[in-house]
């Protein structure tokens, strides 16, 4: 199964995700090509240079924030 996603990195990408209320999921890297999904989806409520709130607060430098892409 091919799973396509986009990683949200920039403030503008996070802002667009917050405005469109798209479902974002949070992933933590456990090593090379191994990840753990920490949160299976929520909308971005707030973000700062250091954190993203959705409704839990996550450190931007410790997690990856992804949205599914439609094929």
Image (tube, rainbow, N blue to C red):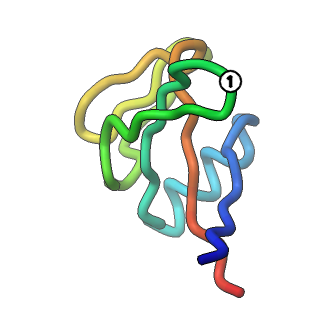
Q: Which residue is at a point 44% across and 39% down the rendered structure image?
A: 26
Q: Position of residue 28 (x, y in %)?
A: 48, 27
**16 or 31: nearer the eye?**
31
Q: Is residue 17 above or below residue 14?
A: below
The C terminus: image quadrant:
bottom right
Q: Is residue 57 above or below residue 8?
A: above
Q: Hey, which residue is sitting farthest bottom in the picture?
A: 71
The N terminus: image quadrant:
bottom right
Relative to 65, 69 lies left or right: right
Q: Position of residue 21 (x, y in %)?
A: 44, 65
**31 or 48: nearer the eye?**
31
Q: Which residue is at a point 57% across and 50% down the rendered structure image?
A: 66
- The local crowd at label 1, few if under 14, some if 14 to 19, many if 20 or more residues have their Cα within 10 Å, is few
Splitting the image into 4 quarters, where does residue 5 fall? Answer: bottom right
Q: Which residue is at a point 37% across and 54% down the rendered structure image?
A: 43
Q: Position of residue 52 (x, y in %)?
A: 45, 29
Splitting the image into 4 quarters, where does residue 48 fall? Answer: top right
Q: Is residue 40 above or below residue 33?
A: below
Q: Position of residue 36 (x, y in %)?
A: 41, 34
Relative to 12, 20 lies left or right: left
**32 or 44: nearer the eye?**
32
Q: How many marks?
A: 1
**69 or 35: nearer the eye?**
35
**Which residue carries the number 1 mark?**
32
What kind of element bears circle 1?
loop
Relative to 45, 64 lies left or right: right
Q: Which residue is at a point 39% across and 22% down the rendered structure image?
A: 58
């Amino acid at each position: 199964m091919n799973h396509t996603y986009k990683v949200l990195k920039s403030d503008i990408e996070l802002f667009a995700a917050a405005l469109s209320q798209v479902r974002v999921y949070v992933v933590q890297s456990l090593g090379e090509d191994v990840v753990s999904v920490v949160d299976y989806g929520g909308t971005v409520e707030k973000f700062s240079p250091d954190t993203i709130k959705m409704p839990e607060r996550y450190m931007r430098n410790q997690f990856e924030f992804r949205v599914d892409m439609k094929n």
